[in-house]
Every structure is written in structure tokens, then in C-alpha cells.
Amino acid sequence: MQIAILTFAALRRGLAPVIALCAAATVCAAPAMLKEEPAKGVLRVGEVVYVDDGSCPAGEVKKITGGNQKAGKTRLVECVKRPEGL
């Protein structure tokens, strides 16, 4: 029994930095520029994407922030100035 506990502890210790790095990479990922709006339910709550579908005035793109109807958070859609680097 002690061998299994030590093995699990060693495994957990070895994977912790990998898991933390993967989580940071996911959270810190730059928002995407899409050509069309993603289907409802595709974006996670708070996830931001930009859509250049021509529906906003010149120099602006659609900013979409994911929501969740079950949680009472609606998807936000607004035209914003095109972010630098996208």
C-alpha cells in the first residue's frame, strides 16, 4: 500500500508543472480572428473571439464573448476597433 502511495505522489509531483503549463497556455492564448460567427454553445463562458464578417463599420470587427444560457450569462456581441496584431 505504501508503494502505491509513493508512486502516486511522485506521479502527481511530476505532472503538476505540466498541468500548470497547459492551463496557463490555454488561458493566455490570444483571441482568434474568425471569418464567421461560431455557433451557439461553442464558446466557453468569457472566451473572446473576433469576427471579421463585414457586418461592422470599416476598421471595426465583431467582438464576441461567450456566455451560457443555463447559467444566465448571455453571449455578448459588439463592434470594436480592430485589435492590433490580429
Image (tube, rainbow, N blue to C red):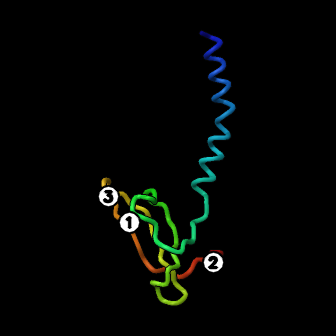
Q: Nearer the viewer, mark 3 or mark 2?
A: 3
Q: Which residue is mark 1?
A: 75
Which residue does the image show at 49% across and 84% down from the upper left? 54
Local crowd at mark 1 within 10 Å, few (<14), some, or many (≥20)? some
- Cβ atoms under marks 2 and 1 closer than 8 Å: no
Q: Which residue is mark 3?
A: 69
Local crowd at mark 2 within 10 Å, few (<14), some, or many (≥20)? few
Instruction: Assign a secondary structure to mark 3.
Output: loop
40 or 10: nearer the viewer: 40
Q: Nearer the viewer, mark 2 or mark 1?
A: 1
Q: Quadrant of residue 2?
A: top right
Instruction: Assign a secondary structure to mark 1.
Output: loop
Task: Give the percent coordinates (x, y) of residue 30.
Answer: 61, 64
Instruction: Assign a secondary structure to mark 2.
Output: loop
- Cβ atoms under marks 3 and 1 closer than 8 Å: no
When the figure is inspected, residue 8 is found, relative to residue 55, above or below; the finding is above
**Residue type indicated by callout 1:** Arg
Q: CA distance from mark 3 to mark 1?
A: 8 Å
For the N terminus, the image quarter is top right
**Residue type indicated by callout 2:** Glu
Which residue does the image show at 34% across and 60% down from the upper left? 73
Tell me: 7 left or right of 80.
right
Q: Which residue is mark 2?
A: 84
**Residue type indicated by callout 3:** Gln
- Cβ atoms under marks 3 and 2 closer than 8 Å: no
Task: Give the percent coordinates (x, y) of residue 15.
Answer: 66, 34
Local crowd at mark 3 within 10 Å, few (<14), some, or many (≥20)? few
